[in-house]
């Protein structure tokens, strides 16, 4: 007795195995905005993020608080000058950022890691480079965004001082000149601090480590240089004080504005660099800014591979 065999369907021809499914993709026929648009978008997004805009309420607290802390002393000085009918402001425009350098350092320490550490930690940097954006575009956008955020932080209180001085009917020419000198000073400070903060933050994807490292470099270097300057002043070695100031970002900016912007030095005994030494200060600052940019390029070329 023969057993019935199950019927088998004949194999379909090779051509019948191909299927085309319409899953809803459509071609993009709009304008190709290219690298410049991507760079501007990354810059604006990073700048907004430096003040917590577009992020959670928790992310806004610290940068906005530091911004207020920077501006409140300037507003108090203006109120005192107006109330007492003073003939000049209590603090020069070029001096204000040096006095508030602790707040500025804290802002850099908190926002530099926020700008770059998350991209490193979550490995999203290669995704940026998969679009029409290159390593240089990414670095320029991040650098410019943090420098712009720092400039806003440091220039805003100077604007408060300037407006208050005009309301107090102080000399317009003197106040305008001082305000312009202050803007030049904080612009250099913003570029220098942004470069240092981003280089340190780009080393580690851990935001906490980045914050601690930035604070250590900015604060410890200033403390060490100030101590050495005090020792040199106590030993009557005043000629060494300007050269010691080359080893801290804060004293570098102080030296430049002392040499070229008519500011009074914050060094012990108000011993600041002369014009010749000021040229060295400028070269060191420009070298640090260029070096920071170069180090960031090298870092992100490796990360983007």
Image (cartoon, helix red, strand yellow):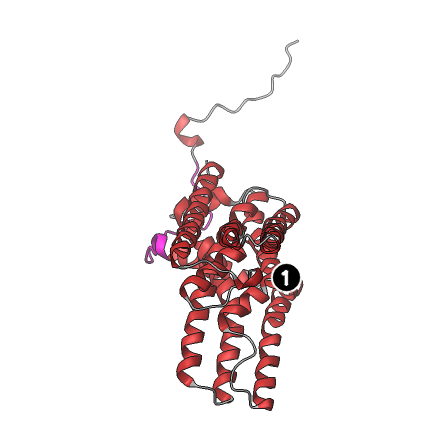
* Residue 264: percent from left, percent from top: 50, 67
- Identify which residue is drawn at 63% across, 49% down: 216
Toward the viewer: 242 or 36?
242
Residue in view at x 64 percent, y 13 percent:
3
Q: Which residues are magenta?
A: 19-36
Describe the element under mark 1 as helix, strand or loop.
helix
Where residue 19 appears, x then y in whole percent? 44, 37
Instruction: Name the image quarter holding residue 61.
Output: bottom right
Residue, far top: 1
Residue 114, placed above or below residue 19:
below
- Image position of 147 (left or right of 51): left
Within the image, what quadrant is residue 171 found in? bottom left
Q: Is residue 178 magenta?
A: no
- Category of crowding for the residue at label 1, using alpha-carbon neighbours closer than 10 angstroms: few (below 14), some (14–19), many (at least 20): some
Give how far across and how far down residue 7 sits, in percent. 57, 22
Q: Is residue 35 magenta?
A: yes
Vertical placement of residue 222 versus 71, above or below = above
| Residue for point 59% across, 60% down | 107
Magenta stretch mostly in which secondary structure?
A: loop
In the image, 82 versus 262, the foreground residue is 262
Of the 4 image quadrants, the one containing the N terminus is top right
The residue wearing badge 1 is 59
Q: Position of residue 246 (x, y in %)?
A: 49, 51
Let me know if residue 98 appears in the view.
yes
> Can residue 45 be seen in this snapshot?
no
């Amino acid at each position: 007795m023969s057993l019935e065999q199950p019927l088998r369907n004949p194999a379909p021809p090779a051509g019948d195995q191909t299927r085309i499914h319409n899953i809803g993709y459509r071609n993009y026929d709009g304008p190709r905005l290219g690298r410049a648009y991507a760079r501007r978008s990354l810059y604006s997004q990073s700048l907004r993020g430096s003040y917590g805009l577009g992020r959670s309420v928790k992310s806004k607290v610290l940068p906005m608080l530091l911004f207020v802390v920077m501006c409140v002393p300037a507003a108090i000085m203006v109120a005192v000058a107006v109330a007492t009918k003073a003939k000049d402001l209590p603090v020069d425009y070029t001096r204000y950022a040096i006095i508030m350098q602790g707040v500025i350092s804290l802002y850099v320490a908190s926002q530099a890691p926020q700008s770059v550490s998350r991209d490193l930690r979550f490995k999203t940097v290669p995704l940026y480079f998969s679009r029409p954006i290159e390593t240089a575009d990414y670095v320029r956008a991040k650098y410019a965004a943090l420098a712009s955020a720092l400039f806003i932080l440091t220039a805003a209180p100077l604007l408060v001082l300037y407006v208050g001085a005009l309301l107090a009917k102080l000399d317009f020419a003197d106040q305008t000149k001082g305000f312009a000198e202050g803007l030049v000073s904080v612009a250099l400070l913003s570029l220098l601090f942004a470069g240092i903060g981003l280089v340190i933050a780009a080393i580690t994807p851990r935001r906490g480590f980045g914050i601690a490292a930035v604070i250590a470099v900015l604060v410890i270097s200033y403390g060490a240089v100030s101590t050495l300057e005090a020792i040199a002043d106590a030993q009557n070695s005043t000629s060494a004080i300007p050269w010691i100031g080359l080893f801290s970002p804060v004293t570098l900016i102080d030296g430049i504005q002392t040499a070229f912007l008519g500011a009074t030095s914050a060094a012990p005994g108000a011993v600041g660099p002369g014009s010749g030494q000021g040229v060295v200060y400028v070269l060191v600052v420009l070298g640090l800014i260029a070096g920071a940019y170069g180090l960031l390029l090298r870092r992100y070329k490796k990360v983007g591979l």
